[in-house]
Amino acid sequence: MAETNELERRRWNDERWSAAWPKREALTDAVTAFVLDAAAPQPGERVLDVGCGGGGLSIAAAAAVGVHGAVVGADLSESISALARRRAEEAGAGNVTIRLVDMQSDKVSGGPFDVVASQFGVMFFDEPVAAFANIRAHLRPGGRIAFACWQSMERNPWFVAPVIAAFVPSPPAPAPGKSPTGPFTLSDVERTTAILDAAGFAEIRQAAHEVTVEVPRDAIVDEAQLVFMGVSDERLAEAQAVVDEYMQRFALGAAQLRVPLAFQVFAAANR
């Protein structure tokens, strides 16, 4: 039996990837307001932030629930969880607790929760139905979930994986009984709706959104990320040149890019 989320545990605890995360928050934080609007956390409520990353959504939710509410941020990256803890402390968000857990299988104290929220933190489960069922088990009866995930890769042309496909090895096939993981695994609305239904959620709905953001060039990909993705030292300069040429279509001066983000927000209720 393969370990739960083995590939993603390695990815999010690799120093090259986790060190790059704060740069990429220029992309992910663009959806915080949309997730909060769908989740609608109220004063005094308990919120579970799944895949909390650097804690931006957790801290924003903490302000919404106030001093009589509480937020638990859950993430499987040790270094990024530490970043979230530091940020919560610096923000004076005393009602935020960060837990190092895998929400596909782990249990989190502090519930039952009124709300589960996530911005791009739920696409990395290799057993998605089991994961969402575990998440639902943390909700009170009638509790609600709202999360952001990407629309299709084709609608997000800033994503460079297809551009460097010739420079990196093919991803390994999932182990028996496992599903592929990655940014676009929940892009298909019908499939994601079916996953949520099978996990026991009701009143499932989806809203598509598009925004344009301005980000530093290295927010999308830098040399360390290319190495992490599997580009060899011998081909690194070539791959970087291909990426640089491709990203020129989004150039906004020498150091900035203007990129379109196509994402969607799912919302549902605990039966």
Image: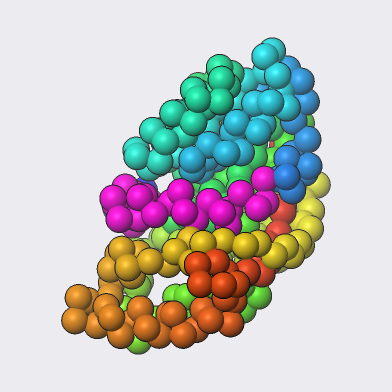
Residue 262 percent coordinates (x, y): 68, 66
Residue 15 percent coordinates (x, y): 28, 50
| Lateral position of residue 253 relative to residue 146, left or right | left
- Above or below, comparing residue 38 to residue 11 in the picture: above
Report the span colored magenta.
5-32
Q: How many marks?
A: 0
Residue 104 in sight: yes
Residue most toward the front? 253
Check residue 27 for magenta coloring: yes
Check residue 214 for magenta coloring: no
Q: Which residue is drawn at the image coordinates 46% and 48% (left, top)? A: 22
Q: Nearer the viewer, residue 138 or 75?
A: 75
Residue 197 percent coordinates (x, y): 69, 51
Residue 93: image quadrant is: top right
Residue 156: image quadrant is: bottom right
Which color scheme is applied?
rainbow
Residue most toward the left? 234
- Above or below, comparing residue 163 to residue 107 in the picture: below
Residue 124 percent coordinates (x, y): 47, 55
Q: Main secondary structure of the magenta part?
A: helix
Residue 113 in sight: no
Q: Quadrant of the C terminus?
A: top right
Q: Which residue is drawn at the image coordinates 80% and 47% (left, top)? A: 203
